[in-house]
Image (spheres, rainbow, N blue to C red):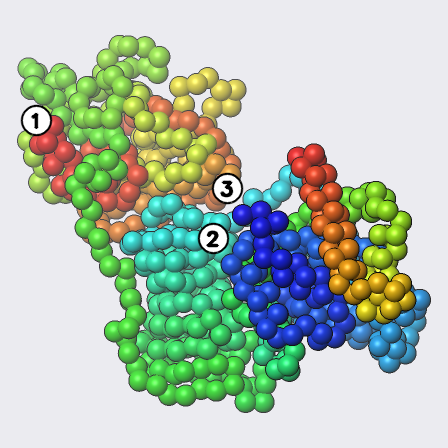
Amino acid sequence: MSIQDLPPEFEQVLNRLLNSRNDEIPAADFEAFQQILASHPEAIQEYFDYLDVDLGIQSHLAEYLQTLEGTASGETIPEPEVAVAAAVGNRSPLINYLVVAAASLLLVLMLEWMTSGDFLWDPTPEQITEQPVPKPAYVATLTRSTDCVWGGKSLPQFAGQRLLSENLILEQGVAEFRFDTGVRLIIEGPTKIDLVTACCAKLDYGKMVLHGYEPSPEFSLITPLLTFHDIGTEYGAEIHKDGEVELHVFEGAVRVDPNQKNDQFAESLIIEAGQARHLNDKISDDIQLQPEIFKREVPGAPQQFQSQRQALQSYDSFHPPEISEPEQASKWQDTGFGWSGPWRNEQSSSERAEGISQPRKSLTRTEVAPSQLGLVEIRKGNTVWRTLEKPVRMDTNAIYYLSFYIKKLNSVGRAQEFGNLSLNASVKQEHPRKILFGMSSINYAILQADMQIIETAPPLQTGETYLFVAKIVASEKASDQVFLRAFSSAENIPDQEPPVWTSATVPFQASNVFDLVRLHAGKKGDYLFDELRIGSTWSSVTNPDLPRLILEQQK
Amino acid sequence: MRIFSYIRTLVPHSSDAEDIYQRVCLTLWNKFTEFDPERSFFSWSCGIAFNIVRNYNRSVRHDRHHFNQELIETMSHKREQHLQNYNLRVEFLQDCLKDLESRDRQLLRSTVFENQSVTEIAQETDKATQTLYNRLSIIRRELAECISRKLQREK
């Protein structure tokens, strides 16, 4: 539909609205005007355009607005008498009130901010396009989602996705966010939420359950009329579009403050576990506690085998198809799936790699199928390379998970005892970058990405098997980030991505395409590697049964 | 101007928009310590203005026109985006005004700039009020289209 196709009465009322100083428009006409605006995006566009024409013509308006700003802030500024008089004759008492005085430097700054929305020292919006714009920060992770239909401009694409400070509209389904402070928020559509910071969110309307996190600072949830602060809490709230709230506290307590204090609601209200209230900014009525009306966790949707299969992109159990004599010489280099060619000694050669096979052993904590048995030993400066069928691309919006078992043998605490797995690019670069996970010579877990090298204490143990699980957040336009968790054999592997990581990089910018995996041991290092996986979900790289099921299907 | 334009969009009457603008300025002043410099000041201000508009509508006289909450929400998001290039559109408007016929410029000046009522102008010029509204409508549409063409060329 074009603007010309809008009902003719729309433009008539619009022009009368722009030109009338009093309520000259009949209520029915105004109601019809509203309905056209609500149902025709073209009508809204026309409304905006006409408003801009009128506001743009009123060249004196900026001066007049500055007068209003001076009044509002209690400060006084030079008075644009003529302009104001021409603008609104009924404002003379206001004008008389104003006294000409010098505005403070602070006021001048505020005026600039208020009139242009920009800082004095900032360029105008048109100029900003030529300046580097700081990248917004991540504040949360979309950890789970079920049957979600997203509206608005920002559309989360997959579980595990890192989220910037942004507005999200969940039209249907249930989604869980974990803020970077550890607080979990489960929302049920239709809900509109603004992720403000890692410890603050705005919820315009909808239904949610918040799970506080003990080490986290107080989390503020701002609704149209009220702000909730969690005190070691699990609580549910339904926020209606008019701002009224039904609050049900399951654990801990919630402190409630009105966004604008008033006579009826001047002090904070503490609502304890087991209580439920109907609230707005003036009233607080007890209601029945009903935990059952909230989705307190995202319903688990068992993934189909086929989708799990697709999520696991590359896998290698270092399982030689035949055991040779001696066993160490068994052909381990060309097994698994998701690879182009075998492991090799050099990045660009075709010579097969020289690692030592242990075909009857496995580092896995659960029993594996015979087709998964085997591991590889890399030692004394040895390096092996393999090419991925699907590279890890940092120049797109994607989440990658990577896991492998690693065990360090025979350490005496010398230099050159490190061992690691890294992702590399085959394209020659002036300043090559890689993402690396491993153990340092003195056994610290080590994570390297971009220019960051993060070693984490306490040191890992020689002779102990660890499962390293990494998460690589790649973003086309926002920042990238890498996380590493080293699980000891005493720890359970969670079904879902955990809130706690062994180490994490700060966000960085990268656009590399990593198509090579490298295993490497220092000149005095001796390491076992097993069960290498790269996938797009947490479960694809941690589910102990998935590789076996896939291998059985391939038979 | 951008913040006022944002408020004016959500409020049918200019005088109400001016009252709200004053309240918004006061709130921005009081809450300025809470502003995160890493965020857009304009977006932050719009968020505050949105809440004040909503509260204002709750207290407004029943016989006074105001948009319903759903429409305000819809328009607020669109308008915030729309105002990103406001300064550029105002520049283009100045160019487009030069192309208008002088009598059209005079009509706009009287109604918009000098705030004269259309009924008064109709009496003075011996024309039907509806004729003048129709003419104003055509002028506004021509100006809006002219700005739109210039924006397209700019892209």
- First in sequence: mark 3 vs mark 1: 3
Q: Please indicate, yes or no, whether residue B112 appears anywhere in the rendered image.
A: yes
Name the kind of residue labelled 2 in the image: Gly
Between tags 3 and 2, which lies in front?
Answer: 2
Of A203 and A139, the residue lying toward us: A203
| Chain letter, disc 3 residue | A
Name the kind of residue labelled 1 in the image: Lys
Looking at the image, which residue is at 88% across and 52% down? B103
Q: What's the mark number on residue A152?
A: 2
State the image quarter where residue A60 is shown: bottom right
Q: What's the mark number on residue A555?
A: 1
Tell me: residue A549, above or below residue A243. Answer: above
In the structure shown, which secondary structural element does the residue marked by tag 1 occupy? loop
Circle 3 crowding by C-alpha within 10 Å: few under 14, some 14–19, many from 20:
many
Q: What's the mark number on residue A383?
A: none
Left or right: where does residue A375 sit relative to residue B110?
Answer: left
Q: Quadrant location of the C terminus of chain A?
A: top left
State the CA–CA distance, disc 3 to disc 2.
Answer: 19 Å
From the image, tell me which residue sits under label 3. A478
Left or right: where does residue A251 sit relative to residue A318?
Answer: right
Of A4 and A136, the residue lying toward us: A4
Looking at the image, which residue is at 29% across and 67% down? A296
Of A135 and A237, the residue lying toward us: A237
Residue B30's x, y, as percent? 68, 72
In the structure shown, which secondary structural element does the residue marked by tag 3 occupy? loop
Left or right: where does residue A125 sit relative to residue A31?
Answer: right
State the image quarter where residue A233 is shown: bottom left
